[in-house]
Amino acid sequence: MAEQVIAPARRTAAVSSARRPSPIRYLGTYLILAIGAAVAIVPFLYTISVSLMNLTEATGGAWLPSTPQWSNYTRAWNEANFSQYAWNSVRIAAITIVGEVIFCTLAAYAFARMEFWGKNLLFSLLLATLMLPEAVTWVPNFITVAWLGRIGPLPWINNWPALTIPFMASAFSIFLLRQFFMQVPNDLWDSAQIDGAGHVRYLLQVVLPLSRAAVMTLILFGFIGSWNALAWPILVTTTPDWRPISYGLLAFLDEAGAIFNLQMAGAVITMLPIVILYFFTQRTFIEGIATTGLKG
């Protein structure tokens, strides 16, 4: 009897051992991940290192500064007038994000929870716009904002409307939120209807609180897009009054010439807000990407 019990256990252990992945496979996976991480991280670390060097070390090909030159950041900040450009970027990002959250939330909810004629066709056309290169939309967008500035009470060129309103409706953001909204159980909608709630109240009191991770992901993407924008701001502005920090960095790279340590200091200053924001929101960001159903 004991042998009959032991024999299946041995067979189970043998099968488990046969199915266990080889350590060599894990080694290859870790090696590929390590190479990918190095490719992504080393340039960033080198930028920080050069930003702390003196000019001789920066031009001499050194890898580490002998004595960190923290004053490089102060010089870059003052000489590039980053304070004005950073304030412009903060204003542009704030206006864009508020509008994007409002309009994309409403559109995503309509596609996810409401039924209307042509919904699937309209959503397919919306997704098709993701295939277009961004540069393709610059000319029609510029013609549109210039025309709206001429007929409206507020000028659009060299002002915040041209820099923010065209980006308040993002196809990717609508898709992201729609996928999350579709995962909200229908039972909650039935319960909300019993309590007398309509679509607006259900969206504000039930769907959005459950979709905090997705909304935070949208905000993070919106901030990164606004902060890094360069080509479109150059196209619709001719004065520095509303030009973002990315333009300030570009202008500073031309002005600094061969002073590589100050150029790198300016690059670090430009990147720092995004790094800090991601550091504090990375858990929510990962949760939002994992649960928004980029899985259908």
Image (cartoon, rainbow, N blue to C red):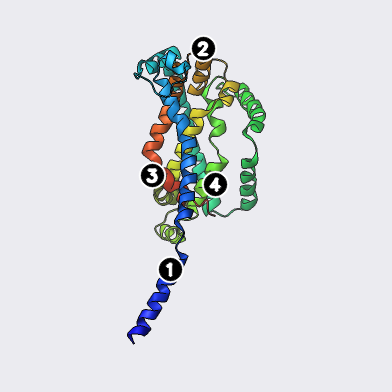
Disc sitting over residue 16 in the figure: 1
Compare marks 4 and 1 and give the one earlier in the sequence.
1
Vertical order, 155 against 32 (above or below)? above
Compare marks 2 and 4 and give the one earlier in the sequence.
4
Q: Secondary structure at mark 1?
A: helix
Residue highlighted by disc 2? 255
Mark 3 belongs to which amino acid? Arg
Which of discs 2 and 1 lies nearer the camera? The answer is: 1
**How far is mark 2 from mark 1, CA to CA?**
65 Å
Compare marks 2 and 1 and give the one earlier in the sequence.
1
Coordinates of residue 278 in the picture (x, y in percent): 41, 37
Neighbour tally class for label 3: few under 14, some 14-19, many 20 plus, Cα within 10 Å? few
Coordinates of residue 65 in the picture (x, y in percent): 38, 21
Does residue 294 appear in this view?
yes
**How far is mark 2 from mark 4, CA to CA?**
42 Å
Which residue appears at 42% of the width and 58% of the height?
188
Mark 2 belongs to which amino acid? Glu
Q: Is residue 166 left or right of residue 70?
A: right
Mark 1 belongs to which amino acid? Ser
The quarter of the picture where residue 266 lies is top left
Q: Secondary structure at mark 4?
A: helix
**How far is mark 3 from mark 1, CA to CA?**
34 Å
Compare marks 2 and 3 and give the one earlier in the sequence.
2
- Residue at the left extreme? 2
Asked whether disc 2 touches disc 1, contact meaning CB atoms under 8 Å apart, the reply is no
Neighbour tally class for label 4: few under 14, some 14-19, many 20 plus, Cα within 10 Å? many
